[in-house]
Amino acid sequence: MSEATKPDVPADPTTIAQQTLTELTESERRLALARFEILRVCIEDGATLVDVARANGLNPRTVERWMDDYDRAGLVGLARKRRSDRGRSKALLPQLVGLVEGLALKKPQPTAAAVHRKVVEVATRHGWDLPSYDAVHAVIAALDPGLVCLAHEGSKAYREAFDLLYRREADRPNEIWQADHTLLDIWLLDEHDKPCRPWLTSIIDDHSRALSGYLLGFQAPSALITALVLRQAIWRKEDPRWHVCGIPDIFYTDNGSDFTSHHMEQVAADLEMRLVFSIPGMPRGRGRIERFFETVNQLLLCDLPGYTPGDSAGAKARLSLAEFETKFREFLLGAYHQQPHSATGIAPQTRWEANGFLPRFPESLEQLDLLLLTVAKSRRVRQDGIHFQSLRYMDLTLAGYVGQDVTIRYDPRDLAEIRVYHENLFVCRAVCQEIAGQTISLKEIIRARNRRRRELRSTLDDRNAVVEQLLAAHRSEAENAAPAATESTPAAPGALKLKRYINE
């Protein structure tokens, strides 16, 4: 049978549908086929549109519209109609773009809806095409995030988020040490059983992230506390688990007064240690020590009673400072120093001990104490000794230095004794006989002086009150006696009064 004599075979509508829907997207194709399956009953079986609509829960007018679309364009007509401007966004006028950007960068930061309303007002006033909300939102979303941060949050937030950073890394242990203080987020009981938050002063090795020294206490940071922590950091530790020690090449701190003091400058010169200070207001340079403080919060404090994150109050203090220090020391030496650090992948203690490192040390612990824990002052030797802080220090050796200027070194925690130097040579230890048998700190002397001054002022006020009272009484008596004298012997105005004897 020739091809021309073959009987006509009706084509499968589904096959036709697959051939005519190639220009549509997948979702449009599925929608067109789904609608065609509903209309198939009308097309092939002759069912009415009303019956088809009722069977599928549709409005008859909807089914009628689908049938019209099918008769007009075939299966493609059953797909959802496309927007004529699909894929194209209506560009705003350059004037409106600049207006949108300027409004979006104002402080406080406006919402996109507020910006759109103002832009519509301007466009209406000038007779321009009104922009849509989506077009305005697209302009705002396209703004540089750094520009938005600088405009709304300021320079500090911009530096923290977008400034280019230089991440330096110490090449060996003790090359750089970082030091800082923090007020811990935990309430402890002080010596009077009152709740108080402790300070933590720490020194960390930049290369290994191992802690070389720390001090916990309720006293606010000071130059003396820094010196005590530096003494512990430099000298050998008694605990066999703690090996970090030695003199660092660079001591990196912030610009606090306890770090920038003349005493610290002299200590750094004597120990051949260079002091480096971070840029004021930019703590990112001290990221090592800041990260350690965060680790203490996350791994230690949050599991202890009295923990209070941030500045919130209400946590009940249960631990004393000694109990907390025991837990902190065990956390430091038993956990932190022994576990691999997230940045280096090596335990801090292991990284510090690697490659056979030999740290630098001072000649003796006494020399280290002399440098760190004493303060140098210049004084002149008098005939009765050396006068300092309203105290008098005497030693027989000073007899040969009367009238000469010397340098004294004293421990602020104990003023019973001072060390005397002349032209950088040790002369003697001068003792204050009044307090030689006891330990009195500089703070105690200052408090005693202030207390004595208050006592004297109170006594002076009492004496002045008595004098004023007597004077007031005398003035009252004189005022009462004056009128009586005037009545007995009236005198003419301006008349002279003569002194008369009793026998007259």
Image: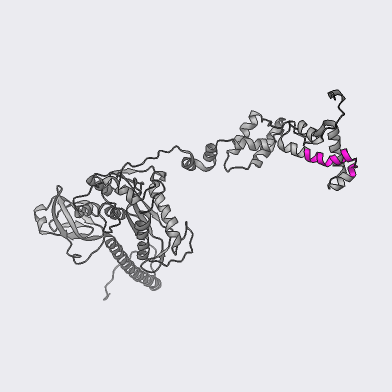
Depth check: give the residue in front, 235 or 419: 235
Is 494 displayed left or right of 501 in the figure?
A: right
Which of the colour schemes (rainbow, by chain, secondary structure, one colour) is used? one colour
Q: In this view, does 444 lie to the left or right of 167?
A: left
Q: Is residue 428 above or below residue 65?
A: below
Residue 210 appears in the rendering: no
Q: Where is residue 26 in the image (x, y as percent from the top left)?
A: 71, 36
Toward the viewer: 320 or 397?
A: 320
Residue 382, quarter of picture = bottom left
Residue 277 falls left or right of residue 98: left
Quadrant hosting residue 74:
top right
Q: In this orientation, which residue lies closer to the viewer: 152 or 369?
A: 369
| Position in image of residue 481 (x %, y %) | 38, 73
**Where 500 falls versus 371 (above or below)?**
below
The quadrant in which the N terminus is found is: top right
**Residue at 35% across / 59% down in the picture?**
329
- Residue 39 colored magenta? yes
Query: Among all residues in the image, which is located at the extreme front?
Result: 1
Corner quadrant of residue 17: top right
Q: Is residue 431 magenta?
A: no
Task: Please report the residue visible at 30 percent of the width from the left and 57 percent of the height from the top.
Answer: 241
| Camera sees residue 82 | yes
User: Which residues fall within the magenta stretch?
Assistant: 33-50
x and y, in percent, of residue 434 in the image? 19, 65
Quadrant in the picture for the C terminus:
bottom left
In the rendered image, the residue lying farthest to the left is 400
Q: Is the magenta stretch mostly helix, strand or loop?
A: helix
Above or below: residue 354 compared with residue 217: above
